[in-house]
Image (cartoon, helix red, strand yellow):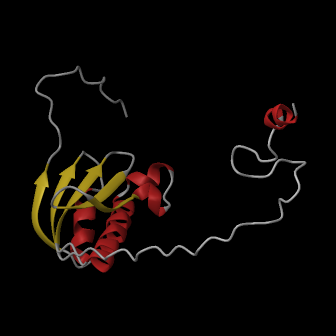
Amino acid sequence: MAKEQQQNQQPDVQPGGKPAAGAKGGAAVSKRKKEFKKKRERRIVPHGLVHVSASFNNTQITITDTDGRVICSSSSGAIGFKGSRKGTPYAAQQAAATAAGVARDQYGMKSVEVRVKGPGAGRESAVRALASSGLHINAIKDVTPVPHNGCRPPKRRRV
C-alpha cells in the first residue's frame, strides 16, 4: 500500500527539470563546463556578383559569390533614408558604397560583375559608387525582366 501511494505522488520536479514551486532543494545548481565555439574561418572571395535592384521607391544592392551565396547586402532604407528619399541616386550611392566596403574589407573581394535590374533612378549612381569604392568592375549587364505580352500593364500615370 505504501508503495502505491509513493507511485501516485507527483515528483517535486517540473517537466523542464526545474524544481516545482513548493519543492525543497532547488538551490543546488549543476555546474556546466564552459563551451568554446570554434572561430569561424574568414572566407576569401576574390571575385563576385553584384545585383542592383533599382525600383522607383528603393535601391537594393546584394553582393554574392559566383555560386550565388549572399556575402552582404544593403539598401537605401537600411542606410537610414526614409520615404521618397530612398529612391534618389544619392541614397543608392551610399548603399552601394556600404555593401562594397563590407565585401572588400571582410571578404577580400577585388573584382565584380554587376547585374542591374529595374527602372529606378539609382542604377548608374550605384555602379559608379561600386567602382569608386575600390572594386574592379569586369562587366555590367542589364537583367530587367521584359514581358513578352504577358499581363496587362497598369494604367498610365498622370503627373
| Image position of 1 (left or right of 39) | right
Count of labels in the image = 0
Quadrant (top left/top right/bottom left/bottom right) for the C terminus: top left
The residue at the point 31 percent across, 58 percent down is: 61
Instruction: Determine which quarter of the picture holds residue 10.
Output: top right
The residue at the point 20 percent across, 55 percent down is: 68
- Residue in front for this viewpoint, 134 or 31: 31
Instruction: Determine which quarter of the picture holds residue 95.
Output: bottom left
| Image position of 19 (left or right of 153) | right
**Relative vertical location of residue 38 with respect to residue 84 in this rendering, above or below:** below
**Relative vertical location of residue 149 with respect to residue 74 in this rendering, above or below:** above
Q: Residue 19's spot in the image, x, y percent? A: 80, 52
The residue at the point 37 percent across, 56 percent down is: 88
Quadrant (top left/top right/bottom left/bottom right) for the N terminus: top right
Q: Residue 138's spot in the image, x, y percent? A: 9, 68
Q: Residue 78's spot in the image, x, y percent? A: 46, 58
The residue at the point 34 percent across, 54 percent down is: 60
| Image position of 150 (left or right of 8) | left
Name, please, the residue furthest toward the front.
1
- Residue in front for this viewpoint, 24 or 56: 24
| Image position of 31 (left or right of 22) | left
- Residue in front for this viewpoint, 25 or 81: 25
**Relative vertical location of residue 37 with respect to residue 69 in this rendering, above or below:** below
**Relative vertical location of residue 105 with respect to residue 121 in this rendering, above or below:** below
